[in-house]
Image (tube, helix red, strand yellow):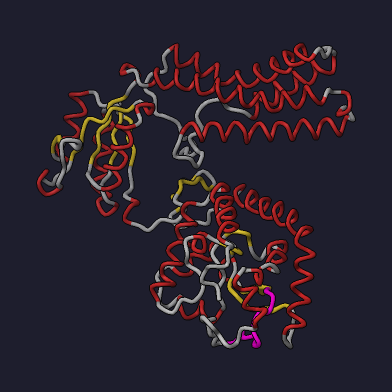
Amino acid sequence: MNSRIDTTRNEPMVFRASFAMAFIRFLQRIVPAVLSSTLLLVICLAYGVPIDQKMIILAAVSAILALLLIRSGRDYSANFDNPRAAMAFSIVQRWLLLLGVLLLLAYSTKWSAVYSRRVVLTWSVATPAALILLSFWLQALMDRAMADISNQRTALFVGINEASTVLADKLRKNVQQSMRVIGFFDDRSAERLGVDHATPLLGRLSDVVDYVHRHSIGVIFIALPIRHIKRVLDLVDQLRDTTASIYYLPDIYVFDLIQAQTRDILNVPVIAMCETPFSGYRGVSKRMLDLAVTLGLLPLLLPLLLAIAIGVKLSSAGPVIFQQRRYGLDGREILVYKFRTMRVTEDGHIVQQAVQDDPRVTPFGGFLRRWSMDELPQLFNVLGGSMSLVGPRPHAVAHNEQYRKLIKGYMIRHKVPPGITGLAQIKGCRGETAQLEQMQARVNYDLEYLRRWSPQLDIQILIATVFQLSGRGKAY
């Protein structure tokens, strides 16, 4: 049997789609198209701009693009805890994409000059604002319809562990999922499990099938450990005589997960347990942010870079730029550029970390290190792709070889490009790591960055880094 398992859907598991829900979903689908085209024509009337053939073409093209690109409903895949923030971000992001396509079409057809800039600018700002407000209202109507008990499915859990209790708690708090949790089944006693009234124990595993028959349960989540896979298969076989939907819930909380996600590789479902956050289009967005910021900064910083280079050359003998081998993406060696701040250029099997009042540091080098200006040449590392603006700071190869043997999961930080700044740095983990605990704290923040990454987090770290450049850090 050649069966395909769909791992791409991330929608509420609604039991019955009422007429109200179907109608609201229809409105959510067409509202972006109708609103964008209608608002364009209304703004033309407000400004006294004639609605000619080219304006009607723009309205029609924008409507088609909005229908294809924009969803006014909740974005279940967005990386936000607040559902309204996720919806607003998704709308603005897709609207900017729509505007980009329109600009490309306008310039390629040489029609960009025929449209009123005042109308287009007002329309470009007013449409997403109006769409966000209207989407909030439609989603509130949808949430109310989904919370109707007639549209809900009853659910029970087979097995009590962290995965099942976490999901049950989330389902109880999110009525929009249209799921009403009945309780749990487990062979262990309530006293042994330490369950409370929020986790009603309905019986043993042998009671599940009979209970499902008698109460017409809609959804069953099987949360038995993988080592009990034989019992899982037997239970699934016995439940084939019911109409219940069955889901297997692996207890992934027993693992230290990095970017956990379900994937579909050639129609075969897999669970990513340790993956880079920059797979697929997210890697492209990360690189675009790096290039945009770096190309914007370099012209402004060139006079400063030139002044620092002259200062380094005049202050002490040696090269202006210090190159050191460090580990980059996937643990591959890279050359990292810095303004030389010491009288020595160590890059061997033993590299001594800089300490406070280090005699190797030149007076001008100490000034650069205090303000982190010695790191500025790494902008060229970012341009070349060996580094990113934000990521785990790269360590000298000698230090990497030392700490990878002492700290569990140390090399996982190399699943992303190293950064000029990072989460660990804005949290105060800078400078010398005289004790193992200090490096462990830095690595913990690096791994947290891998788990939490989003473009918004990168921007927050960059802003925090700017505010922390006060010269009072631990960089010496």
| Number of marks present in the image shown | 0
Magenta part mainly helix, strand or loop?
loop
Q: Dividing the image into 4 quarters, which one contains the N terminus?
A: top left
Q: Residue at x 62, y 68 (%)?
A: 371
Quarter-of-image position of residue 68: top right
The percent coordinates of residue 460 (x first, y second) are 55, 50
Examine the rendered structure and indicate whether residue 318 appears above or below residue 238: below
Residue 133 in sight in this render: yes
Examine the rendered structure and indicate whether residue 65 appears above or below residue 454: above
- Left or right: 452 in relation to 40: left
Q: Nearer the viewer, residue 476 or 21?
A: 476
Quarter-of-image position of residue 57: top right
Q: Nearer the viewer, residue 238 or 413?
A: 413
- Left or right: 428 in relation to 308: left
Indicate yes or no whether the magenta region holds residue 14.
no
Residue 2 in sight in this render: no
Q: Which residues are magenta?
A: 338-348
Q: Dividing the image into 4 quarters, which one contains the C terminus?
A: bottom right
Examine the rendered structure and indicate whether residue 474 appears above or below residue 290: below
Q: Residue at x 15, y 47 (%)?
A: 193
The percent coordinates of residue 123 (x first, y second) are 72, 23
Examine the rendered structure and indicate whether residue 379 appears above or below residue 15: below
Q: Residue at x 52, y 64 (%)?
A: 425
The percent coordinates of residue 305 (x first, y second) are 75, 68
- Left or right: 251 in relation to 32: left
Q: Nearer the viewer, residue 460 or 280?
A: 460
Q: Nearer the viewer, residue 175 or 375?
A: 375
The percent coordinates of residue 224 (x first, y second) are 25, 47
